[in-house]
Every structure is written in C-alpha cells, then in structure tokens.
Amino acid sequence: MPLSAPRGARRRKLRRRADMPLLGGARPPIAALLALLLLVAGATALVLGDHDRTAVDKAVLTSQQRVAEDGALALRASLDESVTDLQRAAALFAGPEAVPADTVLDKLGKVYNKWRGLAVIDPAGGTLLAARGETIPLADTLTDKGDRTDKADKADRAGNSGKQDGGKGGGATPRLVKLPSGDTRMLVTAALRGGDKPRLLVASGTLNVPGISTGENRSLLVVDSAGTVLAKDGPSIARTAWAKRAAKTAAAAFTKTPEPGGHPGASGRLMGGTDKHRTAVGYAAAGRAPGESSPAGGLGLSVVTSVKVTEDAKAVRTQAFGLVAAAVLLLLAVLVTWVLIRTVQRPLIGLYLESRRLGRGELDRPVRAFRGREPARIGAALESLRGQLLGGRPTRTGRARGGIGTRTTVIVCGVVLLAWAAPLLLLLNRAGSGVAVPKQLVEDQRRRTDTAADRVRKALNEGWADVASVAQIVGAGSEKAGSEKGDKGDKGEKEAREDADAGSATKAVLQTTLREHTRYRSVYVLDADGKVLTRAGAAPRHPAGRKPYADSVAQLNTSGKEPAVAAYAAVPGGKGRTVVGEYDPQFLISMVTRPGLGQVWLVDDKHRIVAADRQHGFRAFSKLPGKHLDDLVTKARKDTNGTALLHRADGGSSLAAAASFTGGGAVRDLNWQVVSEQPASWLELPEYTAQRHTMLAGLLGVTAAVACLGWLHIIVVRPLRTLADQAEALAGGDRKTVLFPQHHDEAGAVVRNLELIRQQLRTAERPPAGRN
C-alpha cells in the first residue's frame, strides 16, 4: 500500500503531461542549439588540424594547373584562329567567277604569315593548281574511303556551313599530320567556291608550344590523345617516368567532362619526384565545353607544364588550438543548454501544469512560486485567479515583479557563445603580412601575366589580319570595277550604277565580316581624308577630320566612358581608302579574364586602364590602384619577359606582375601592358588555410547561436512576455478579452487554460436569471 500512492501520482503526472504538445515551444530550439554546437565543436577539432608541407605543395600544384590551363586555352585559340581565318578568307573569294589560284595565294600571303605552306588543289583529280611555302602532304589531305569527287562535294558543303555558322568551326575538321622529319603539322582545308569546278584551299601550320616563358626549371609539353609528345620547350623531361605518367594522365583526362564555368576541358595536377627533389606538374586539355564550338577542341591535344619545387615549407601547427577551442565550446554548449532548460523550458512546463490544474477546478493547493520575471508574474496571476475561483475578489497581486527576465537570459547566453565565436572569426590565427610566400608562386604570377599579354597581343594582331584581308577583297572589287569602266569607256548613268554596285558589294563584305567576327563593334571604310564611305555595325568613332592611321592597331581616345581601339588596313590601290575594324570593349575584357590570376588590368602607355577582368570591373582610363603597380609597370617596360613582386602592406601581402606587348606586329606602337595582382590570402598556403578554417569555425558558431537563440526568442520569449500581460489583466478583473493561442506549444497551452479560467470566472460573476 505505501508504494501504490507514489506510483499512482506518477501515472497521473504522466497523463497530465501527455496532453502537452511535443513539437514547438522551447524544446526544439534548445535541442537544435545543443546539436549544432556539438557539430561545430567537432568540425573545429577536425578542420583546425596541422598543415604540413603538402599544403604548400597544393598551392604550387594549383598554380601549375592554372599555368597549364592558360597554355591550353592559348593553344586552342591559336589553332582555332588559323582554321577560321582560312575558312573566312576562302569565303571572301567566293563569287560567280573563279579567282585564279595564284591570285588567292598571293593575297593570302600578303596578309597572313602564320601558315608554313599554302596550296590550291583540284580534289576531283588530285591536281595541284598552285602552292606557296613548304610542301603540303596532299595524300593526307585527300585520303578518303569514298570517291575524291565526293570529297570535293563534302568540302563544298562544309564551306557553306562554315559561312552560315559564322566561321565558328563549322567547316572541315583540321587534322594532325606527322612529317618524315618528325615534325607535326596541322592541316586545314576550306572550299573555294566560284566557277564550275570545286577547289580546295589547303594550309599547313606548325604545332608550337603555347607562348609561356619556360626558363631553367620549367618545361612545357604538347601531347596528343595517345600521350605522344608533339612539341616541347624547356629542359628535356621526356625520359623521366613521371613525365610519361603526366602525359598519359593528361591524355586520359581529355575525355572527361569539364566543370561548369571553369576551364573548357579537363585539367588537373600531380606531384612527381622524391621528397628532396619534387616536381609540380599541371596539365590541361585544349578541349571544348559541352555545346561549345571549337575546331581545334577535337584534336585531342593537351598541355603539360612542370616545375621543380626548390623550397621547403614550414609546418603550421593548429591541432592543439583546435582541440582546446572545441573543448571550450563543448563546455559552453552544456552550460548554455542547462541554463535555458532551468530558466525557460522547465518554468514554462510548470506554468502549463499549474494552469491546467486550475482550469480543471483543482483548487486545493496554492500555485507554486516560479523563478524568473515572466514566470513569476504568470505564477502570481494564477495564484490570484485561484483565489477568485474560490470566491475572492480580483486583486493586483498579478503585478508582481522580480528575478531576471527571460529575454535577458537568452541575451546572456548569446553573448557567452559569441564570446567564443567572435575571436575565431576576427582575431585568432591571423596570418598577417609576414607569411612566407614561395618564390615559385611569384614567378608563376609573372608567367601567367606574360601569357595574358601575349594572348591579347596575338588577338589584336589577328584582328588586324582579318581587316587586312577585307581590305584586299575591297581592293580587288575596286580594280575589277575600274577595269570594266576602262573597257566600256562610257560614263553617266551606267558608271553611277556600277559605283553603286561596287558600294553594295563592299557593304556586303563589311556586314559579313561583322557578323562572323564577334571581336568588332563596327567595320567601315574611310577615304583619304577620314570621311566614312560605308559602314556596318555601330557608329564609327574615328576622330572626325583626321586622316586614317597607317596599317596598325590604334587607340582612338584617352578619355570617356569606354575605350575605342581600332585596326586600320589600307586598301591596295584604293587611293588612300582604309578599312577599319573597331574592337568591342567586351572583347578586350574577355581577353584579360582568367581564373586564379586575381585582378587583371590592360593599361596603355600612360598607365591608364583600358580593360579589366569581368569579376572586378573598371572605370575607363582610371589609374592603377597603387603606386607599387605604377612602379612595376615602369620596370616592366625594360624587361621583355615581364616582372613581378611580392608587395607587403599593413593590410596583407599581394602578388603583382606586369608584362609588356612583345613581338611586334600591328600593335607595335601601342606600348600596352597587362598588370595583375592578387592578395596572398587567396593562395592555398597553410597559414591562410588555417586562418580561413578558423574563421569558418567562428562563423559556424555565430550562425548556430544567432539562428537557435533567435528562434527561441521569437517562439518562446516574446509570447511569454505577452502571456504575462494577459494573465495579469485577467487577474486584475478583465473578463471581456477573449484569449486566443497563437501557437500549439507550451505557451499556447497556458493561454487555452487561461481562457477556460476566464469563462469560469465570468459564469460565476453573472447574476442569476430573474434577479433585478
């Protein structure tokens, strides 16, 4: 019998708690806070581990991968340009009458000097019609399982599709051919349309390594899909085992799908050699992204770069720090959870049980006292309501004050957790400006900047070559019209009509050029005095009243909202006429945009910004952001290979490099340079990795504390303060206000019980029916 009473009391207590909601209220945010803090503590102990030499190797390896990607992109762009140039040039010679083969090759030779050999052949009979330069292996060109006439028809259709596709790889696919000497050539074909007989224009180009400076420690390889080395530069590395492994890895990775938004082809890195003599290798496929058109992207070529790692890195020890930080967070998590359970969750459950008891009419014992301001106010109000249910009068005892408020408790818990997270986020494990940056990374910054400058220079020169080929066609049309006039010998309406026809033909050529070349914003023809004769595209920005520039690429302005740069090519026999192609500013921006190089600027001879990478933007013709960059540009003008430095400042270190245009061509008078700078904190060095991991741990702690405590404040603290006001008003005699629960949780359950008590009090206070 003595044991039955406590057992029955426990059963009654369990039944009373069974009606309380399990979801919502104080328990979910408190439980979530404890779980998240435990996860943050575990993550802190894991991510703040020791960083040894392999972390520095990773930074150098990433840099080599970027160098290889730059090389692969430059290689693919160069080969694509050769293909599209030949196809577009062949399209410009299209007409009702066939242009003599020797004339075609002579005109191409005056404009382009990239091809080792040029030939025009009759594919039906395999007859060589004209040739220039080195001997082209025509057998490889005409090899086909079908009839050679079918080959001509296919080439003709390929040329037509190339013209329709804007020259973006729609023509015949280029081929790699091995010469008896061992050299590799890329053969490109294009259909010459005109006359009754089909003809093929064939060009052979050298497969060179990308324009990346090598030096004593760096080597470059171009390999095919089988891993065979086709071209190389730098120290001989082809006999080493890891070099063969790199070539095979690059070849195998060629077929992998590239990452969206990254390099248009597979890329990677690996470490070769021994612990004392390490070699960092990067490889990248000169492929194409899904949906991208690139003739050279299907050749299976990859670029492999390697460099000897000569520096030994310092190990960064953060394991003990991470364990201590995790242990402190564990103690704080237990402490905060205990405080919230004692001051928020348990009082709220107690208020629910007491209000439920009063709502059921169990008035035999007083309401127990509660700690905390809001629970104490509600408990005092419930005690006052118990007295009123027993026949007492409304009192103001529900206005009791005392204890620490629930909001204050939650704020203090948040401050305690932020006291752990804020130092990790803002102060501890800072790398500072004294981090030892490997010299190889500084050198790679210079090499990549030099590669970017070479890429921009070649793109501008290629643009001028395209304009020059248009000038050749315009000049050929003028000579033909002039000869027809001389033959006919009459003038008047017929001559005017012929001039109009010639103008229409010129405009058609300009429109075709603009449509097929996305690098231009407008293409037009100027007379000897600088007057625009005909144009295609946007309004010309050639200075009014100024005579055309000589054959070159010229900068047209030094102020304004956007730079104006144009390629000028004189029309042969055109009496001063000049074809002008104005470059689109977005084309210049695309040329200097490369991942992993930081901020990149293209500056003119006065150090004014002409273009910058897309990520950071720029204001045209503004100055470089820093005197150290101006000094670097000045120094780079004296060094043909560019220069770089590790700039240290109060805000941290940065890698900066500058490279001038070298190699001449149409851009010889521009004196432009490419400048790059990236903070050292962006590198994958162990000091910066530890700093980022420490900041991540602090950020996770802040997020967990703010999210869960904010959740608790919205769901529990604010409704609890409102509930205290409602309970005090009811205890003070307010019987008219109907109490509605806002949420199905502990606070909402207390509100429902108060509404039952209000109804009971209102019924008891209502006078009996019929009484005056």
Image (cartoon, rainbow, N blue to C red):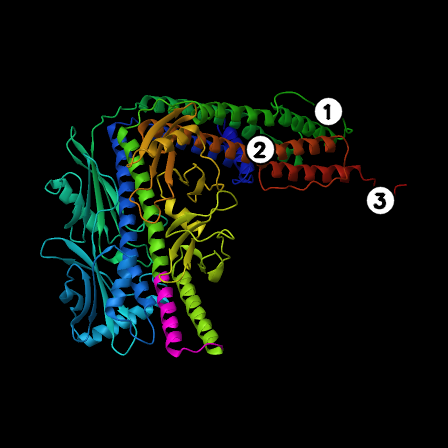
Query: What residue is shown with label 1?
Result: 397
Query: What residue is shown with label 3?
Result: 769
Q: Considering only order in the chain, which callout, 1 or 2, is on the residue closer to the N terminus?
A: 1
Decide if residue 729 is on the left or right side of residue 570: right
Decide if residue 341 is on the left or right side of residue 697: right
Q: Considering only order in the chain, which callout, 3 or 1, is on the residue closer to the N terminus?
A: 1
What is the spatial separation of the Cα atoms under label 2 and label 1, in whole angstroms?
Answer: 27 Å
Question: Magenta part of the protein: which range?
Answer: 470-492
> SS at mark 1?
helix
What's under tag 1, amino acid-wise?
A: Thr
Q: Considering only order in the chain, which callout, 2 or 3, is on the residue closer to the N terminus?
A: 2
List the single residue furthest toward the front.
489
Q: Are marks 2 and 1 in contact (CB under 8 Å)?
A: no
Q: Nearer the viewer, mark 1 or mark 3?
A: 1
Q: Are marks 3 and 2 in contact (CB under 8 Å)?
A: no
Residue drawn 47% across the image and 46% down it:
563
Look at the image and say whether residue 113 sits in the magenta stretch: no
Residue drawn 48% across the image and 30% down it:
702
What's under tag 2, amino acid-wise?
A: His
Q: In terms of secondary structure, what is the magenta stretch mainly?
A: helix
What's under tag 3, amino acid-wise?
A: Ala
Q: Looking at this view, is 183 or 3 the one in front?
A: 183
Picture coordinates of residue 91, whole percent (x, y): 33, 67
Q: Looking at this view, is 608 or 132 the one in front?
A: 132
> SS at mark 2?
helix
Query: What residue is shown with label 2?
Result: 713
